Image (tube, rainbow, N blue to C red):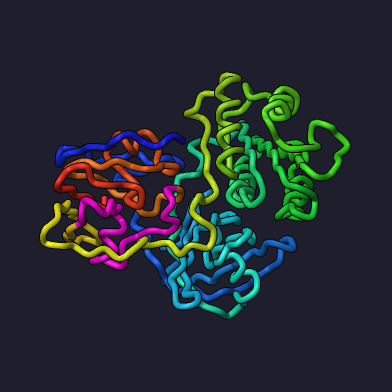
Amino acid sequence: MAPSPTVSRTEAVADALLHTAVGGTGGGRPRARFHPLRVAEVRPLTAESVEVTFAVPDDLVAEYDYLPGQYVALRAQLDGHEVRRSYSLCRPPTPGSVSVAIKRNSGGWFSAWAQTELHAGDEIDVMSPQGSFTTSLADLDGAHVAGIAAGSGITPVMALATTVLARSESSRFTLVYTNRSTLDVMFLDELADLKDRYPTRFALHHVLSREQRAAPVLSGRLDEERLRRILDGLILPQTVDEWFLCGPFELVQLCRDTLADVGVDRAHVRYELFTTGEAGAPAGPRRPVEVRADEPVRTIEFTLDGQSASVQSPVSARESILDAALRVRPDTPFACAGGVCGTCRARVLTGSVTMTENYALEPDEIEHGYVLTCQSHPTTDRVAVDYDN
C-alpha cells in the first residue's frame, strides 16, 4: 500500500467506526493489553519453525477471545533489551489457549531465541488479540473464500480456512500456498488432514519454487504469469466471495494488482504483510530526545486508558507520535513499530499529522481520523490523539 496522505481531523470527527470483523462492531477496536502467560507447549513444525501454545487462565479467557485471522504481540527481555514481535494466531478460537507459529528469520533476534530458548513452563508477556484480517461475511453458507499465502503467511490463513469450513456445510475454501520445498511447508500434516476432512470443499494447491511438482503450473516462483494461469484454471475469481492474501510485500502487491486487473473488487480483498522492520532491531524509541529551550517544538497530547498526557517534541527530531508518547507513558501500545500490525492505532482529534507508511489501516479508518502513531509525525504545532476510541 502506498504511504498515506496527510491526515487532519478536529473534535467533530464522528464517534463510530464500523469494524471489519464478522457482523461489525461500533466504537473501534478494544484496547490491547499485555498479560503474562505460561507456555504450555512448543511444537516443531519444520526445521525452521515452531508452534507455541500459551495457557490462558480462566480469569483472562474473555481478554483472549479472538476472531480467526487476528494476531498477538509477544514481549520479552533479551540481553537487557525489550523486544516485541507480532505473530498471527494459527488455531481457531479455543477457550483456555492461544497458539502462534514462529518461523526463524535470517538475522531475526526474537525468532532465533524462540526456536532455542523458549520452553514449556516459561512465562512471557502476550498482548490481547488484535487485527482486522478477518472475514466480513456474516453468512458463510455457500460462500467461496480463497487464500494465497507464502511461508509463515499460512498462519492466519490456516485459522481462517479451518473456521470457514467448520461453520458451514456448504462453504468452500481454496488455498494457494507457496514455499521453496516440501520441507519448508508449515502445517503440512494439518493441511493434509483438512483436505481429508473436507475433500470436496477444500482445494489445496502447493506451489514450490525449488521442487518439481507433477503439475508444471505449481512448479516455480509465483510470478504474474504463473498466478494468472492459476486464477484461470484452478480458482476462477468470479466464483470467489472473499480473498485473503498474506506474505511479503512483493507477493501481496502482485496478487492485489493481478486480482484487480482480472476484475476483482478491492473491497473483497483482504491482506496482511510480514513485518517490514529491520530484522533483529528492538522496537521502540529510536534515539534519546532532549528538548532544549531555544528550539521550536510540537506539543503532542494523548489520551490512554482514560488518562491524558502531554509531551514536547522538538521539530528537528522528526519524532513519531509513538516515540514521543513512550517518553512519558512507557505503556503506550505498540508491537511491530513498522506500520504493519496496527497496534499503535489512535484517532487524531486536533491538528494534523503525516504518515510515513501504512500497511494496517483500511481507507474508512483513515477517513474517520485514525492513524498509526508509530508512523505519524505532527505537521501542526499542537496535535491531540486518542488511543481509547
Q: What range is drawn magenta here?
A: 313-339
Q: Is residue 308 visible?
A: no
Q: Is residue 213 left or right of residue 40?
A: right
| Residue name at image x 76 percent, y 36 percent | 200
Number of disc labels: 0
Work out whether residue 117 or residue 192 is closer to the camera in this orientation and state it.
Answer: 117
Q: Is residue 120 above or below residue 248?
A: below
Residue sitting at the far right: 214
Q: Is residue 59 above or below residue 200?
A: below
Q: Is residue 92 visible?
A: yes
| Residue name at image x 76 percent, y 51 percent | 193
Q: Is residue 31 left or right of residue 189?
A: left
Q: Position of residue 295 (x, y in %)?
A: 14, 55
| Residue name at image x 61 percent, y 52 percent | 155
Magenta run includes residue 215: no
Q: Is residue 11 left or right of residue 156?
A: left
Residue sitting at the far left: 293
Q: Position of residue 61 (x, y in %)?
A: 45, 66
Residue sitting at the far bottom: 121
Q: Position of residue 273 (x, y in %)?
A: 53, 45
Q: Is residue 147 left or right of residue 306?
A: right
Q: Position of residue 279 (x, y in %)?
A: 54, 58
Q: Is residue 188 above or below residue 204?
A: below
Work out whether residue 221 or residue 243 is closer to the camera in this orientation and state it.
Answer: 221
Magenta run includes residue 319: yes
Work out whether residue 297 or residue 197 is closer to the camera in this orientation and state it.
Answer: 297
| Residue name at image x 16 percent, y 59 percent | 310
Dividing the picture into quadrants, the one containing residue 102 is: bottom right
